[in-house]
């Protein structure tokens, strides 16, 4: 088994894939950490659509992938950034995804939390932003899932001060029937969210974010911080009211943040746990036994792959996630809603394949090799 892979300069190199995958087995939910994988959606490759059309989703394959994550004890964070919210999946598609996934979670006993945003409107007044949030919050609560209040492009455009954020989030938290997760998504994931919480100064923005939580600690289960800044996350984590959890969304520094320190730790809600699901689950089970070193030994080597997938432009990490799902056999094709399979280069795919294979992520290394060779041939690389 050998394969020729292109480098950034165009020269081909020979790579010898692994012959055996990492040995992992499904298991029960974790005891030491609450862990969600933000899951991708599987496109319908036979739908006659354009990148501007509403998403055509293969529901069977999409739900099968969620069952895969649940089988390893992971929770599913549904209809989030990883599912291409606002990058191929509109609110109508997200609403259907939430309904179907919540019903599937109920049928198999899986844990699920769903994204609540405002993407049914492109822009609007603060009142219209509130109404959009309320519509989505009602649907998620009716489905029986936990709500994740996501950052809103429309709110970022409509708000003129930190007080506007305090008012909108306070209104939503007062009416939420169960504690929610607040999500701070940085502009590296979505440039339209620059200046969220009323300031481009992250210290000032952090203060406003914490003010929202301090005013409604009984309505906030936790926060998800996606700023790719470990020190800031730790600072926020240490300033949270008692009982409010921090779910790391840092796809660059997650092992150290989940492991924690003498003053606390982060739970997890991560896009990288889509391709890393079984391995991440095995690592957290080591942590459940108090084996911090065993946890780090399993998870630290995955950071190189994660940093590669999430390299700038970070928002296109979804392409690598779906690419690896195809190589791993979780779907029969490499097609994405919105045509986003074109968002990364061939050298990027080649490196992602090599890193993932080195970690033993592919249940069938031969299948992954054959599919990688298929992709290479489309680009004119003959083996």
Image (cartoon, rainbow, N blue to C red):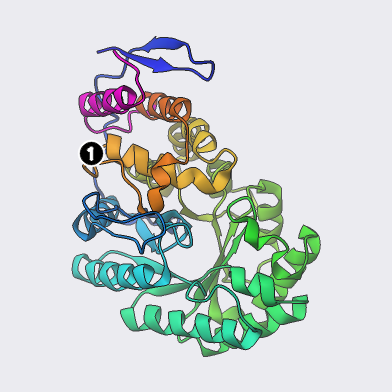
The stretch drawn in magenta includes residue 89: no
Where is residue 215 shown, x and y percent of the image?
68, 82
Above or below, comparing residue 15 to residue 347 in the picture: above
Is residue 158 visible in the rendered image? The answer is yes
Q: Quadrant of the N terminus?
A: top left
* Residue name at image x 37 percent, y 61 percent: 53
Q: Which residue is mark 1?
A: 329
* Residue name at image x 24 percent, y 49 percent: 45
Above or below, comparing residue 369 to residue 319 in the picture: above
Q: Quadrant of the C terminus?
A: top left
Q: Magenta segment range?
A: 359-383
Where is residue 232 shown, x and y percent of the image?
71, 53
Where is residue 234 shown, x and y percent of the image?
67, 53
Q: Quadrant of residue 39?
A: bottom left
Comparing 297 with 70, the one in front is 70
Comparing 218 with 168, the one in front is 168
């Amino acid at each position: 088994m050998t394969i020729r892979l292109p480098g950034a300069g165009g020269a081909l190199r020979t790579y010898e894939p692994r012959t055996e995958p990492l040995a992992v087995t499904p298991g029960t939910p974790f005891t030491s950490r609450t862990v969600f994988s933000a899951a991708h959606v599987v496109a319908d490759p036979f739908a006659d659509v354009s990148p501007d059309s509403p998403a055509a989703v293969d529901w069977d394959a999409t739900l099968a992938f969620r069952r895969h994550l649940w089988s390893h004890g992971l929770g599913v964070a549904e209809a989030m950034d990883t599912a291409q919210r606002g990058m191929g999946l509109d609110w109508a598609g997200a609403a259907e995804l939430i309904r179907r996934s919540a019903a599937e979670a109920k049928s198999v006993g899986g844990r699920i939390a769903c994204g609540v945003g405002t993407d049914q409107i492109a822009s609007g007044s603060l009142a219209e932003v509130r109404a959009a949030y309320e519509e989505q919050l009602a649907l998620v609560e009716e489905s029986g899932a936990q709500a994740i209040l996501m950052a809103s492009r429309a709110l970022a455009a409509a708000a003129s001060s930190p007080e506007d954020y305090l008012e909108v989030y306070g209104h939503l938290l007062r009416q939420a029937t169960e504690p929610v997760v607040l999500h701070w998504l940085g502009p590296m994931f979505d440039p339209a969210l620059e200046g969220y919480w009323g300031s481009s100064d992250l210290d000032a923005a952090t203060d406003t974010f914490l003010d929202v939580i301090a005013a409604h600690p009984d309505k906030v289960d936790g926060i998800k911080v996606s700023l790719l800044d470990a020190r800031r996350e730790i600072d926020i984590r240490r300033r949270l009211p008692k009982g409010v959890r921090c779910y790391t969304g840092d796809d660059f520094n997650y092992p150290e943040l989940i492991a924690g320190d003498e003053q606390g730790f982060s739970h997890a809600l991560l896009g990288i746990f889509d391709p890393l699901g079984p391995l991440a689950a095995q690592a957290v089970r080591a942590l459940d036994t108090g084996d911090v070193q065993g946890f780090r030994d399993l998870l630290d080597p995955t950071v190189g792959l994660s940093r590669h997938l999430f390299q700038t432009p970070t928002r296109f990490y979804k392409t690598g996630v779906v690419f690896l799902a195809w190589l791993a056999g979780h779907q029969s094709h490499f097609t994405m809603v919105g045509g986003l399979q074109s968002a990364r280069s061939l050298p990027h795919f080649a490196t992602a394949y090599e890193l993932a294979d080195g970690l033993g992520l592919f249940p069938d290394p031969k299948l992954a090799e054959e599919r990688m060779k298929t992709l290479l041939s489309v680009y004119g690389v003959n083996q």
